[in-house]
Image: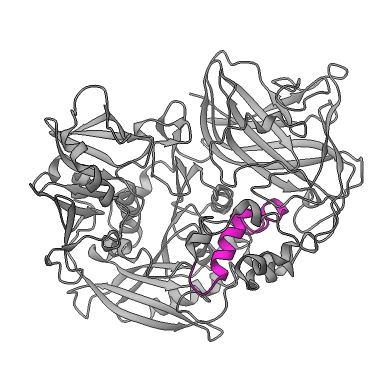
């Protein structure tokens, strides 16, 4: 017996899916005319989304035969569901331990599958059962209505100020009058403008013009890829072009995620008067803050995976990006560093060579630094990220910039998410509750554009500025500011009897500053660049229990807590340290240690010592001299439970994030001979090393 479902994306019906025995058929709705088309054999690429229809088809019999009652459902394929919430006559079952593909039942019968994706919630639903699913959220009368098809005007080669032409696709709502003037949403991408284009049609369906562009040097655009450098001017020039089109009303919004987020924020820093709204998701930050030269270091695999994938040709090689066709562990060990692209992809990389020609923070890097141009930002910006987003340093930089210049109507939304936000309720062995993913993710984005591009009075500007998820309590909270006004930076001090090496040592975190003679003045370790600390390259809730057995990691741990300790905001480690070398790195990590000894990483960052006085003032170390380092640690919202302990660890390397510092003080791209260094971390009344925790008051 065939099973028929309708497929919705972002609240808009895209077609009909029929499961017939072992076969799956798809009858799409024509994008332009919004009329049904004939059934064809289903291929995942037809959807333009991420709903795992093939996986659902493979397991459909399990879903239909399962007993959807009680405290949970465990299927033979390993899927696990928990009863989540009622939706009218429907019961939503939250999928745990994997991507959130939830199930909706009515009296025990499966009627829908729901994927709360970031580009738009995707729903498979039996015809007529939409009312028992979160699709009802799109019925909000204040939302732009889904009433248009898509008119693809084609590709335009838009000239930039230097004559380079960028491939630019324009999509308009079908059926509008030639006299109609439209607000526009602009997306600028390094990943080929045709990728994910179906996801952006949701805005065209609701009355927006959408412009999708390849940045220079990528896909069908002219010029060479110089990451970061041209994005401000190219974005502004493109926006001017949009403003001059006959279909444009002059109001432009920017959307971007990851590198696309950088292009959006960079364009906003141009101050172009046509910009009226920005939605920035998980944005890559400035090169010396986030990627390329994070904290002054030279980034390793996160940067290499992206750069090599971009350097194969004009279109991204996603098998390299994902570390599938190359071995990341082998790639980061190749020397000299300059030769890595030739050894891996068979030819040189323009961006890699260019960055090597700028080993210090100079005018090239200043042009790429978002915060230096933040005074020009005037458009309302919605910033979205997660506690485990690998680009969270860039998100923090963007938010600090907006706050410094008091940009009106700035809002931030931070979830228990990775770089692909709103995907799952569990990461590694950490569990965040069924509310960790939301069904209105894309609706909040739409409301932002509706308010500031269409000027619909939906009240988003009156909502609290910050919305964040407090892990541990597993609840969403709101605040009038970020960091929350309810949080206060509180120092917690490092102490030991001189043997803080590894988690088996005597390092201690304490509330009182150190007193003279009460403990040893410092802890020491030897940093060997040939034997760096191995850590994951992403900011995941990694269990560091094994790494913390290393003698070259200093570990400071609080006593077991007797009551919950809640933190929300940015952190900072203030470290007083000395090295026998003329340069080195310092890496700081905050962890939550549970009652079984697992040490779960919450926030971390790494800095290069030569930039301790600022990126504009590099200075070699005086061997043995104690210096102060202020190490920023990205945003976090977390509850340390009673019985758990707070842990801070310090070391001088993080191979998955940055190439090990040779300690020589010479150009890192020249691969100077490594020098072993004797490192000391001080904790005395004169040098009170500590971490500043944003303690949250209820």
Above/below status of 170 relative to 416: below
Magenta stretch contains residue 312: yes
Furthest residue toward bottom: 163
Span shown in magenta: 287-316
Magenta stretch contains residue 219: no
How many numbered marks are there? 0
Q: From this viewpoint, is residue 140 visible?
A: no
Tell me: 280 left or right of 9. right
Tell me: 179 left or right of 465. left
Q: Quadrant of residue 629?
A: top right
Tell me: 349 left or right of 57. right
Name the residue rendered at 46%, 26% in the picture: 472
Above/below status of 408 relative to 513: below
Name the residue rendered at 74%, 50% in the picture: 660
- Measuring from the top left, give residue 164's x and y in whole percent: 52, 84
Quick one: 451 or 358, which is closer to the camera?
358
- Measuring from the top left, give residue 191's x and y in whole percent: 46, 67
Name the residue rendered at 22%, 43% in the picture: 113
Furthest residue toward front: 22
- Measuring from the top left, give residue 435's x and y in whole percent: 35, 34
Colouring used for the render: one colour
Name the residue rendered at 34%, 32% in the picture: 434
Tell me: 633 left or right of 402. right
Q: From this viewpoint, is residue 81 visible?
A: yes
- Measuring from the top left, give residue 546's x and y in whole percent: 64, 30
Quick one: 170 or 244, which is closer to the camera?
170
């Amino acid at each position: 017996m065939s099973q028929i479902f309708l497929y919705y994306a972002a609240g808009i019906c895209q077609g009909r899916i029929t499961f017939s025995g072992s076969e799956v058929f798809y009858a799409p709705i024509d994008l332009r005319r919004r009329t049904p088309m004939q059934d064809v054999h289903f291929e995942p690429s037809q959807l333009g989304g991420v709903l795992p229809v093939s996986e659902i088809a493979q397991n459909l019999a399990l879903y239909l035969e399962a007993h959807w009652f009680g405290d949970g459902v465990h299927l033979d394929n390993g899927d696990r569901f928990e009863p989540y919430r009622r939706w009218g006559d429907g019961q939503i079952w939250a999928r745990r331990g994997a991507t959130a593909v939830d199930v909706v039942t009515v009296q025990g019968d499966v009627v829908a599958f729901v994927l709360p994706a970031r580009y738009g919630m995707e729903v498979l639903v039996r015809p007529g059962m939409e009312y028992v699913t979160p699709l009802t959220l799109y019925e909000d009368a204040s939302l732009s209505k889904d009433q248009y098809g898509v008119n693809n005007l084609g590709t335009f080669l838009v000239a930039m100020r230097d004559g380079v032409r960028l491939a630019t696709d324009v999509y308009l709502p079908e059926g509008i009058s030639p006299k109609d003037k439209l607000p526009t949403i602009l997306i600028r991408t390094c990943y080929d403008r045709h990728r994910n284009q179906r996801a952006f049609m949701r805005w065209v369906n609701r009355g927006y013009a959408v412009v999708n562009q390849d940045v220079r040097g990528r896909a069908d655009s002219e010029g060479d890829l110089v990451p970061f450098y041209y994005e401000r001017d190219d974005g502004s020039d493109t926006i001017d072009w949009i403003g001059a089109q006959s279909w444009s009303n002059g109001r432009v919004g920017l959307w971007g995620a990851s590198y696309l987020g950088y292009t959006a924020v960079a364009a906003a820093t141009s101050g172009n008067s046509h910009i009226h709204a920005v939605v920035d998701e998980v944005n890559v930050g400035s090169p010396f803050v986030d990627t390329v030269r994070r904290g002054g270091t030279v980034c390793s695999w996160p940067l290499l995976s992206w750069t090599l994938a971009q350097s194969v040709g004009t279109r991204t090689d996603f098998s390299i990006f994902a570390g599938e066709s190359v071995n990341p562990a082998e790639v980061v060990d190749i020397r000299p560093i300059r030769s890595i692209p030739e050894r891996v992809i068979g030819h040189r990389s323009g961006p890699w060579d260019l960055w090597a020609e700028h080993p210090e923070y100079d005018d090239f890097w200043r042009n790429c630094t978002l915060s230096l141009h933040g005074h020009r930002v005037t458009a309302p910006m919605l910033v979205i990220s997660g506690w485990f987003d690998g680009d969270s340093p860039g998100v923090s930089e963007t938010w600090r910039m907006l706050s410094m210049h008091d940009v009106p109507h700035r809002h931030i939304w931070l979830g228990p998410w990775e770089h692909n936000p709103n995907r799952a309720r569990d990461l590694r062995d950490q569990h965040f509750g069924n509310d960790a993913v939301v069904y209105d993710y894309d609706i909040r984005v739409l409301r932002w554009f509706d308010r500031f591009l269409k000027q619909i009075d939906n009240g988003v500007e009156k909502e609290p500025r910050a919305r964040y998820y407090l892990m541990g309590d597993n609840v969403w909270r709101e605040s009038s500011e970020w960091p929350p006004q309810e949080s206060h930076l509180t120092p917690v001090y490092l102490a030991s009897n001189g043997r803080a090496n590894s988690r088996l040592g005597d390092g201690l975190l304490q509330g009182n500053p150190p007193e003279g003679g009460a403990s040893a003045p410092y802890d020491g370790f030897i940093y060997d660049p040939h034997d760096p600390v191995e850590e994951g390259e992403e900011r995941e809730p990694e269990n560091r229990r094994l790494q913390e057995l290393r003698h070259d990691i200093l570990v400071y741990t609080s006593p077991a807590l007797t009551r919950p300790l809640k933190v929300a905001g940015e952190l900072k480690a203030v470290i007083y340290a000395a090295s026998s070398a003329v340069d080195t790195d310092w890496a700081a990590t905050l962890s939550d240690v549970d009652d079984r000894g697992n040490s779960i990483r919450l926030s971390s960052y790494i800095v290069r010592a030569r930039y301790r006085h600022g990126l504009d003032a590099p200075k070699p170390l005086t061997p043995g001299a104690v210096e102060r380092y202020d190490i920023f640690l990205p945003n976090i919202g977390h509850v340390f439970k009673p019985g758990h302990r707070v842990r801070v660890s310090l070391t001088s390397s993080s191979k998955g994030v940055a190439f090990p510092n040779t300690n020589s003080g010479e150009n890192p791209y020249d691969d100077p001979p490594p020098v072993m260094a004797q490192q000391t971390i001080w904790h005395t009344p004169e040098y009170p090393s500590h971490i500043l925790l944003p303690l949250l008051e209820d």
